[in-house]
Structures are given as structure tokens and as C-alpha cells.
């Protein structure tokens, strides 16, 4: 899956999706294999979304390769292609590669600077990864 447009000024899923797309993905990541009507009903607490609007957004997510669609009887069911964790891992990996390709050592230095507040366990994992990387060279 290619990296989606990343919006630096946003948070969470809104960095990758529009507001309605993010809400739909939250719903489908919590309970997969849902129809458009079921997703529309789950969205009702937030705002009254038109069935056609929800259908259009969900079908666009299928076109982007984010959701898959299957037919059960006369009902179309939708599910995420990747779990939330897999999606975030893939998107962050693509973004990191693009940053390093574009900015090289500057991007790496800024990422390391951002670790000042990191969990010591994360720093230990990074040290192990670097050791393994050096060993494999």
C-alpha cells in the first residue's frame, strides 16, 4: 500500500484520512465486516450522515486499497485490509523512508533528538536494532 497524504497539522488518523474517513475506519477497526447501513448507524451519535455519503466514502476507501468489499447475499460487507497497527506501521515506515530519502542525515538527527523524552525500553530496542544492523552489514 502506498503512503497516504500525510497532514502534519493533524493528529491521529486525521493525519492520513479526512474526518469522515477516519470515523469510518475507527468503526471498522473496532468491528469488521459491516455494511454501509451498519456504519451509518454507528456514525449517528456523531452526526446524521446520509447513506449515499457514507457509501461514497467507503467505496473510495475500497478504491484506495484501504478497505475490501465482499458480498453476502444482497449485502456488501466492508473490512479493513490491514489492522490499525499494521496500517500505522506501514504508513510510518513509508513516511520515514521518504523523509530520509529527501533530507538524509538531517531527518535521522531530528528523529534521534525527538527521542529525548522516549521510554528507556524504546531506546534499548533501538540500540539492539542498530547492533543487529551493524552485525548484518
Image (tube, helix red, strand yellow):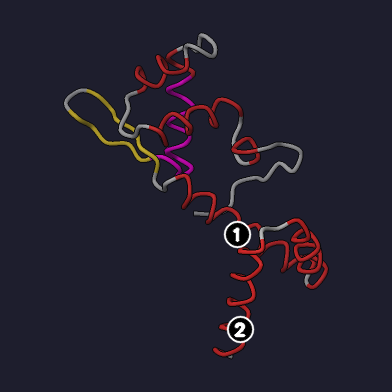
Q: Is residue 126 above or below residue 111?
A: below
* Residue that extends furthest to the left in the rendered view of this protein: 73
Query: Is 79 displayed left or right of 3 in the figure?
Result: left
Q: Main SS type for the magenta part?
A: helix
Residue at image position (81%, 63%) is 113
Label 2 vs label 1: CA separation?
Answer: 23 Å
Q: Earlier in the sequence, mark 2 or mark 1?
A: 1
Q: Kindly identify which numbered label has been placed on residue 53.
A: none
Residue at image position (32%, 24%) is 35
Query: Is 82 displayed left or right of 128 in the figure?
Result: left
Q: Position of residue 133 (x, y in %)?
A: 59, 83
Residue occupied by mark 2? 131
Q: Is residue 136 above or below residue 73?
A: below
Q: Position of residue 34 (x, y in %)?
A: 32, 28
Give the residues drawn in magenta, as a range.
54-67
Residue 95 quadrant: bottom right
Check if residue 62 falls in the magenta segment. Answer: yes
- Taking depth in this image into account, of 97 and 50 the one nearest to the observer is 97
Q: Secondary structure at mark 2?
A: helix
In the rendered image, which quarter contains the C terminus?
A: bottom right
Amino acid at each position: 500500500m502506498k503512503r497516504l497524504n500525510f497532514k502534519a497539522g493533524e493528529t491521529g488518523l486525521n493525519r492520513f484520512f479526512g474526518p469522515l474517513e477516519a470515523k469510518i475506519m475507527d468503526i471498522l477497526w473496532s468491528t469488521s465486516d459491516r455494511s454501509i447501513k451498519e456504519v451509518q448507524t454507528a456514525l449517528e451519535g456523531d452526526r446524521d450522515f446520509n447513506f449515499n455519503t457514507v457509501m461514497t466514502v467507503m467505496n473510495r476507501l475500497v478504491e484506495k486499497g484501504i478497505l475490501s468489499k465482499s458480498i453476502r447475499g444482497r449485502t456488501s460487507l466492508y473490512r479493513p485490509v490491514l489492522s490499525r497497527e499494521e496500517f500505522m506501521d506501514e504508513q510510518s515506515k513509508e513516511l520515514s523512508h521518504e523523509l530520509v530519502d529527501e533530507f538524509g542525515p538531517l531527518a535521522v538527527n531530528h528523529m534521534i533528538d525527538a527521542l529525548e523524552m522516549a521510554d528507556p525500553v524504546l531506546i534499548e530496542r533501538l540500540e539492539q536494532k542498530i547492533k543487529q544492523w551493524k552485525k548484518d552489514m
